[in-house]
Image: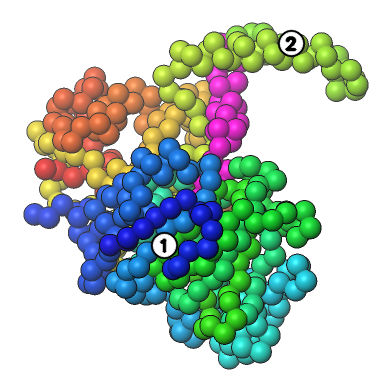
Amino acid sequence: MPKKARPAGDGEEEGPVPRQAKVEAACGSSSPLDFDSPSGLFESFIAPIKTETFFKEFWEQKPLLIQRDDPALATYYQSLFRLSDLKSLCSQGMYYGRDVNVCRCVHGKKKVLNKDGRVHFLQLRKDFDQKRATIQFHQPQRFKDELWRIQEKLECFFGSLVGSNVYITPAGAQGLPPHYDDVEVFVLQLEGEKRWRLYQPTVPLAREYSLEAEDRIGRPTHEFTLKPGDLLYFPRGTIHQAATPEGLAHSTHVTISTYQSSSWGDFLLDTLSGLVSDTAKADVALRAGIPRQLLLQVETTAVATRLSGFLRMLADRLEGTKELPSADMKKDFAANRLPPYCTGDGAELTAPGGQFPGLDSTVRLQFRDHVVLTVGPDQDPSDETREKMVYVYHSLKNRRDTHMMGHEETEPHGLRFPLSHMDALKQLWTSSAISVKDLKLTTDEEKQNLVLSLWTECLIQVV
């Protein structure tokens, strides 16, 4: 097990089986990580640091360096991605820009060495060996099962998308100039060694990626070398750069990142549109027209005063709101996250199995961490009333091969129910098991239709 951990910056260191259980069955080899639950996975991921300590002292606050002298963990990390994996991956049809970037840091600037079209391994290896270029492989969880397994559990733990990139850098080279990111970053060192330098953020908890000139960032606040099995965490906005030392073999590390566009500001923007819409239906003041020629005015002090009054009205309404409307965040998370990790053909995720649920059945929710509930207007264009509905979105049918690849917008898989079904759905969500008869719905037909719909989507099972 990991033997020592410390905040980064102490100077240089030396260095019948339930259906879901089948789906989440481990693949053959044992793992030093705990995949029994999302919280268990994260606890083992940052061990020996405790989860409570991590969020109290480090999350969004300062870097954490965990150096481990654990050969078994180092071997496991090395299995996640190796330089030698590139040959087989290139044979599957990788493309520059989409799947692979080739780059170097030259005099503090990023130089991209991508070719056009498909990546050929021999050319990639030539650029790596002769031009000392770094190979950046985008979203390897699309192809590497164990990274899928890790990132799927982390998405459940954080309730946010989790992406990854692999960086392979030859000896004495650096791929990227100093920069900061708009994501929380976990670095796992897989092969070789990497020398890291971290700097004081110029934009704490940054909302966008940015390069930083060397003459603006000052002296490093932290310097250290990562070796296989080591883990580094730093908050978004942390300026960083890393290079492979001279005289050593190449370095391979993977960055696992999360919490992009997941701030309170993002959540407020997501919630406000629905809140304003609901309030405008109930209060004629919000439906009144803006003053004539308002859009032509330069002085807006009086308008700002009026808007502040509306915001206070919205705040008062929010205090008594039971169901927060979400315009996009929940929907986007459900649509774009990884499907549950599974071995085999994944039929457990798409075809309902087990006993057919009836009125006398006892049922339980499955894949709870892959399902979100949200309230919103009816999206059926034929329904002119636009009544509120409950949406049950899930990721069971999501595509692993497009995860975090920025493809065109996709609609999430799921179901919609009348708002009157919310209490019954909450019963299912909060109970380990519940009798169909006890669901808080008016008629037996409604109860049976609800559980049948969820069963058809593989979201409940009879126990």
Q: Which amino acid does label 2 sit on?
A: Arg
How many C-alpha atoms fall within 10 Å of the one at disc 2: few (<14), some, or many (≥20)?
Answer: few
Which residue in the structure is indicated by mark 1? 67
Question: Nearest the camera: 337 or 87?
Answer: 87
Q: Which of marks 1 and 2 is nearer the N terminus?
A: 1
Q: Which residue is drawn at 28% across and 47% down?
A: 367
Q: Position of residue 438 (x, y in %)?
A: 16, 25
Position of residue 350 relative to residue 61, above or below, is below
Q: Position of residue 335 (x, y in %)?
A: 47, 49
Q: Which residue is drawn at 53% across and 54% down?
A: 9
Q: Residue at x 48, y 14 (%)?
A: 319
Question: Nearest the camera: 454 or 175?
Answer: 175
Q: Is residue 342 left or right of residue 332?
A: left
Label ID, residue 306: 2
Front disc: 1 or 2: 1
Give the extent of the magenta segment. Answer: 256-282
